[in-house]
């Protein structure tokens, strides 16, 4: 079924919409949740939470791209669950590692000004990514949005792990310089 029709079913409050999303997007959502949580049972529970959250969110939202909308919900719920879990046991997993790599090139959060400019920051990052060559953009997004391990990225991109690490380091530095130029860094 086409995504536009699925969204229309949500707006009609038809439970068929949830079944259609589950049938069409469960593998995609599971992959996102599994990559972040590294636990099959947690990932399955999180996918169920995504379906529930989609039911609650549509309406009032009418997503232009359903897959992206659901992926964002899955990522956010998984990160929240991961954070809750790791608050209890501080581990050194891929999620912590990937997110910590970005700390130096993003502005510090917490200030009112930063909170107000979150949308502007998002637009600036999207503009930065749009200016990258396709392969670099894919690598950056797969690492820092989908939180793929370096080893997996290296295999997929037919590169050595060291080359992937170096390229990601250069991309983070480019992002930092870009955000400084755009006035996001203090």
Image (spheres, rainbow, N blue to C red):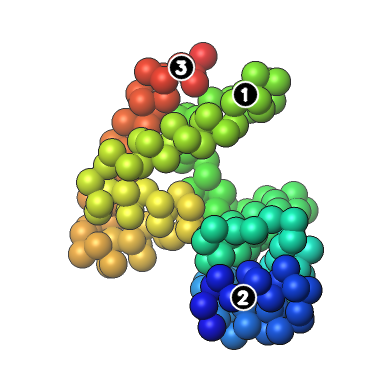
In-image side of 174 versus 62 (left or right): left
The secondary element bearing badge 3 is classed as loop
Which dot marks residue 80?
none
Q: In which quarter of the image is residue 155?
A: bottom left
Badge 3: residue crowd in 10 Å (few <14, some 14–19, many ≥20): few
- Where does the image place residue 128, in percent across and percent down from the top left? 36, 36
Badge 1: residue crowd in 10 Å (few <14, some 14–19, many ≥20): some
First in sequence, mark 1 or 3: give its number.
Answer: 1
Q: Residue, x 23% and y 46% (percent of image)?
A: 133
Q: Quadrant of residue 129?
A: top left
The answer to whether residue 41 shows anywhere in this view is no
Looking at the image, which is closer to me, 161 or 65?
65
- Where does the image place residue 144, in percent across and percent down from the top left? 46, 49
The secondary element bearing badge 2 is classed as helix
Q: Name the residue under label 1.
A: 114
- Where does the image place residue 24, in percent across and percent down from the top left? 55, 81
Q: Name the quadrant of the N terminus.
A: bottom right
First in sequence, mark 1 or 2: give its number.
Answer: 2
For residue 116, above or below residue 135: above
Q: Mark 3 points at which residue?
A: 183
Q: Residue, x 35% and y 23% (percent of image)?
A: 177
Q: Name the residue under label 2.
A: 6
C-alpha separation, residue under disc 1 versus residue under disc 3: 11 Å
In-image side of 19 versus 33 (left or right): right
C-alpha separation, residue under disc 2 versus residue under disc 3: 41 Å
Q: Residue, x 47% and y 35% (percent of image)?
A: 123
- Where does the image place residue 21, in percent across and percent down from the top left? 62, 78
Looking at the image, which is closer to me, 147 or 138?
138
């Amino acid at each position: 079924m086409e995504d536009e029709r699925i969204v229309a079913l949500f707006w009609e409050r038809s439970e068929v919409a949830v079944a259609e999303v589950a049938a069409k997007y469960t593998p995609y959502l599971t992959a996102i949740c599994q990559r972040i949580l590294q636990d099959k049972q947690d990932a399955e529970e999180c996918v169920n939470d995504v379906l529930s959250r989609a039911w609650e969110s549509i309406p009032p939202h009418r997503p232009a791209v359903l897959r992206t909308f659901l992926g964002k919900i899955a990522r956010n719920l998984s990160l929240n669950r991961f954070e809750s879990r790791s608050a209890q046991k501080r581990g050194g997993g891929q999620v912590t590692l990937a997110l910590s790599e970005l700390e130096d090139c993003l502005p510090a959060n917490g200030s009112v000004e930063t909170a107000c400019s979150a949308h502007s920051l998002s637009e600036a990052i999207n503009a930065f990514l749009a200016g990258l060559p396709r392969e670099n953009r894919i690598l950056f997004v797969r690492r820092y949005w989908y939180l793929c391990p370096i080893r997996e990225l290296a295999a997929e991109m037919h590169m050595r792990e060291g080359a992937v690490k170096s390229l990601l380091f250069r991309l983070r530095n480019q992002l930092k310089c870009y955000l400084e130029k755009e006035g996001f860094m203090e």
